[in-house]
Image: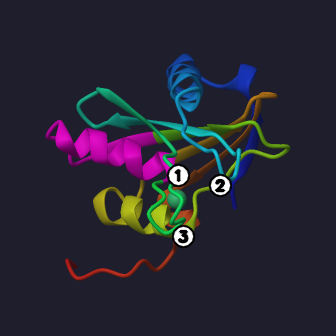
């Protein structure tokens, strides 16, 4: 079960990750849903990579912010992740879609997922909590 928190209660490193995600959100391309999302992923080596949602008129080609951040990190040679923050201007903190949960589960199943809205409401869960039995060909 995700744990609820307030932004001000979080450790500085997690607040920093949320701030990076909020800044990436400002670049979101969301002319269809008008639901802008930003993500920032912290790698095991300590680097941070960001992503935002990139929608497409075909809808199916839309890329979520979380997967955009993962793609940026993997493109930089990263494979292990400690935490990911996602931010949206929603009433409740946004949660990752099923496809993003699957992608996170393959690379770092125990990743800390920090979900925040612009009002400072936060939910925290592990990747294992969000997707308990992911599909896998590797284990
Ligand atoms: Zn997604």
| Applied colour scheme | rainbow
Disc nearer the start of the sequence (1/3): 1
Q: Which of 65 and 80 lies nearest the eye of the viewer? A: 65
Residue 95 on the magenta span = no
* 65 on left or right of 18: left
Mark 3 surroundings within 10 Å by alpha-carbon count, few (fewer than 14), some (14 through 19), many (20 or more):
few
The structure residue drawn at horizontal position 58% and vertical position 63%, both measured from the top left corner, is 97
Ligand 1 within 8 Å of the CB at mark 3:
yes
Expressed as whole percent of the image width and height from the top left, the position of residue 49 reads 35, 31
Residue, disc 3: 98
Q: Which of 134 and 34 lies nearest the eye of the viewer? A: 34
Q: Gap between marks 1 and 3, in whole Å?
A: 17 Å
Label 3 residue SS: helix
Label 2 residue SS: loop
Disc nearer the start of the sequence (1/2): 1
Mark 1 surroundings within 10 Å by alpha-carbon count, few (fewer than 14), some (14 through 19), many (20 or more):
many
Of discs 1 and 2, which sits in the foreground?
Answer: 1
Q: Quadrant of residue 96?
A: bottom right
Of discs 1 and 3, which sits in the foreground?
Answer: 1
Expressed as whole percent of the image width and height from the top left, the position of residue 62 reads 48, 58
Mark 2 surroundings within 10 Å by alpha-carbon count, few (fewer than 14), some (14 through 19), many (20 or more):
many
The structure residue drawn at horizontal position 22% and vertical position 79%, both measured from the top left corner, is 139
Return the mark for residue 55.
1
Q: Gap between marks 1 and 2, in whole Å?
A: 18 Å
Q: Gap between marks 2 and 3, in whole Å?
A: 9 Å
Ligand 1 within 8 Å of the CB at mark 2:
no
Is the N terminus in the top left, top right, bottom left or bottom right quadrant?
bottom right
């Amino acid at each position: 079960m995700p744990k609820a928190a307030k932004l001000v209660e979080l450790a500085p490193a997690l607040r920093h990750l949320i701030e990076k995600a909020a800044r990436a959100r400002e670049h979101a391309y969301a002319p269809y849903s008008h639901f802008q999302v930003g993500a920032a992923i912290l790698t095991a080596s300590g680097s941070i990579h960001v992503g935002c949602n990139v929608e497409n008129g075909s809808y199916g080609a839309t890329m979520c912010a979380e997967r955009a951040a993962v793609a940026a990190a993997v493109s930089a040679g990263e494979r292990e992740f400690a935490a990911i923050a996602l931010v949206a201007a929603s009433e409740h903190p946004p949660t990752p879609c099923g496809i993003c949960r699957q992608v996170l589960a393959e690379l770092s199943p125990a990743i800390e997922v920090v979900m925040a809205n612009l009002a400072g409401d936060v939910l925290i869960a592990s990747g294992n909590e969000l997707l308990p039995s992911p599909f896998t060909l590797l284990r």
